[in-house]
Image (cartoon, rainbow, N blue to C red):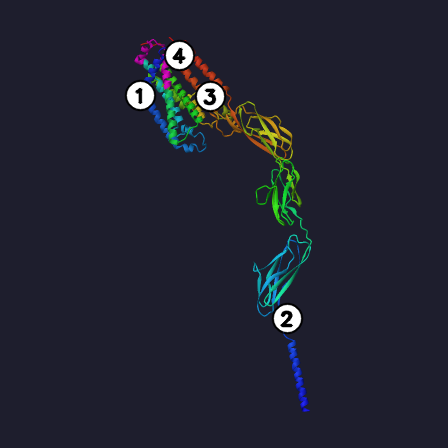
Amino acid sequence: MKNRVKNLFQRFVLTFAMVAALIAVSIPTPVAAAGSLTMSTSYPGITVSAGDTVSFDLDFDNETGSGTDCALSVTSIPTGWTGYFSGSSKEISNVYVKTGEQDALATYALQVPDDAAKGSYKVVLKAAGSGASSSVTLNLTVNDEETGLSSLTTDYAEQEGASGTAFTFTTTIQNNTADAQSYSLTSQAADGWTVAITPSGESTQVASIDVDAKGTQALTITITPPSGVTAGDYTIPISAISASDKLSTDLKVTITGTYGMTVATPSGTLSFDATANKKKAVTLDVTNSGNIDLTNVNLTASAPDDWTVEFSESTIDTLAAGQTKEVTMNVTPSENSLSGDYEVDVTAKNDASSQTAAFRVTVKTATSWGIVGVVLIAAVIGCLVLVFRKFGRH
Amino acid sequence: MSGFTALYRKELTDHFSGVRVFLIFCLMFIVTAMSLNGAIGNLSDAIADSKEYVFLKLFTTSGDSIYSFTTFLGFFGPIIGIALGFDAVNNEKSQGTLIRIASQPIYRDAIINAKFLAGCTVIFVLTFVLGGFETGVGIIKTGLRPGPEEFGRIFIYLLFSAVYCCVWLAMSVFFSVICKHAATAAISGISIWLFLTMFMSLAAQGIANAIFPLTGWGAYYNQYKNYSLQIGLNRISPYYLYSEAVSIIMDPSSRSVGLVTESQYSGAVVSYLSIGQSVLLIWPHLVAMFAIAVVLFAIAYVCFMKQEIRA
């Protein structure tokens, strides 16, 4: 009996030991155990546009127990797509992964081609270390953003200024097509207006310009209105036409009204000679140099005392913008005026505008008294001759 | 013109070989040099206002303690004229040479004509030599270059100065005809010169004030008339005429002789007259000066022709 019990006990212990041993064998430390390497990225599925460049940060988890040198490769990529691995700002082909987790150890930059069609694409990356490897699959969805929506845009497309101002616009051509385009630039301006188109920062006027695919080109457009332009709003359409694009924008210019007048002589000289107490005719040009018609322009003169200044037309009823009116001024210096220069100011004035021209009048002595003097000398000599005749020659 | 040329040559020879003309030349050269020196010293002040016609300023600028060239010529010009003519006729008479000349087969008026014209020649030579001397030394010492207009003005000025001297020559020839003694003729000439040069302005002022008093109730209204009369009386004096004319011809910026009213100046712009305009302004002066010389000589001529010539 005693033996049976002993045997039973032995069998129990043995069984227990076996079970314990089995348990010990069947519940080892985590099953992944022997050398697992994981490469992952936080957002493996993203939506992109054609032509985009996207980058993925690659995280590594090395559980093999020792650091390993992994070769990085792309196992699957759609045709036309390109990409490369980088780390520490350099292109790389291998990465050394220490034990443990390491985030963003390497980066994969992916260039989506310009002509990528809408749809889903897969890119598979692989990291192969010694005895362990891992893959990550990137799911890319190319959205339906259309190519070819190029544009012509202008900052401050509406400008205002007085006549005589040159207006400068900055216009940008955006080529959204997948190809470089050559745009021919045209403008439709009224007669007398000049439109100069230059690439920004340059001085050469261009009639056409090349813009890279997906590129932009800034243009400086200078619009000069004609000198006699009347006040008002003007629209200057600008168009850029290429083989596949027809772009246009409207530039708006508002010319504000200016009043202006000039008083001068046809030759431009503001001086003339005159003789004391003798009428002298001088032709004046009164010009409306503004862009608004002038009415009731009065001509007045400020002359030295006792001088008379008359105008053939002392009031001009209407002087259209840009028009010139010829007026004759009759100046009669005073009888007592001295020889030499005097100032006569002629003013053209209406409610809105006024302009003065200062004339320098050189008064000359009439030579008639000089002749009297000559006659007097002749008379004196004549008398002397008479005296000679009467008393001489004894 | 029988005998005139011979007499004229002889008179010129007498003048240029005599001590009198030599002394006059020496005196005038010294005076010119001194006045030019004074003018150069004060030139920078004189041209402070206007930088044009600087060369003319050499003639009109006075030194610190010396008169200008134009002032000197105005003063000494009459002395030259009187010195050249005061003994023209009476000296010949008192030495008894006149009757000898008169007895030659020549026209009698050739004597006085030759004497007067020889004197005129000396005056013209002297004036232009002095003017040329002043201009030449002025160019060398200052480095200024006179323009054509300045040359023209200087030429007219010298011409006018010579005629002015000739007036006094004609007057002193007249006195030499009517005065028996040379000393009397000289004193008469000098006293008239002194009166017209120094005291005429005082006399004119006195007369004008007597006719148009500047005191009392009418003073304000009389001012213009008083001044006009004063100028009119002053202009009897060749010295005053000469000074007025010189101030116009040598200063292109002066625009009027005599009185200028406020209204004449309204609107006037500072400017220079052209030489033609300046000459026109003083044309009456030139004519009057020439006429005075001719008339004075005519009187002397008539007096001489009416005199009897005896031993």
The residue lying at 44 percent from left, 15 percent from top is A380
Q: Nearer the viewer, residue A316 or B147?
A: B147
Callout 3: chain: B
Q: CA distance from mark 3 to mark 2?
A: 134 Å
Disc 3 + disc 1, Cβ < 8 Å: no
Quadrant containing the N terminus of chain B is top left
Q: Which residue is mark 3?
A: B283
Q: CA distance from mark 4 to mark 3?
A: 28 Å
Callout 4: chain: B
Q: CA distance from mark 1 to mark 4?
A: 30 Å
Residue ranking furthest to the left: B95
Identify the element where label 3 is drawn: helix
Amino acid type of the residue that numbered disc 2 sits on in the rendered structure: Ala
Q: Which mark is residue A41?
A: none
Q: Nearer the viewer, residue B282 or A199?
A: A199
- In terms of secondary structure, what is the magenta stretch mainly? helix
Q: Which residue is mark 1?
A: B19
The residue lying at 64 percent from left, 79 percent from top is A21
Q: Are marks 3 and 1 on the same chain?
A: yes
Left or right: B132, with A12 as reference point: left
Q: CA distance from mark 3 to mark 1?
A: 37 Å
Amino acid type of the residue that numbered disc 4 sits on in the rendered structure: Val
| Sequence-first disc among 3 and 1 | 1
Q: Is residue A388 magenta?
A: no
Mark nearest the camera among 3 and 2 is 2
Amino acid type of the residue that numbered disc 1 sits on in the rendered structure: Val
Q: Which residue is mark 4?
A: B302
| Sequence-first disc among 4 and 3 | 3
Q: Which mark is residue A32?
A: 2
Identify the element where label 1 is drawn: helix
Q: Residue B120 is drawn in which quadrant?
A: top left
Is residue A109 depicted above or below B85 in this figure?
A: below
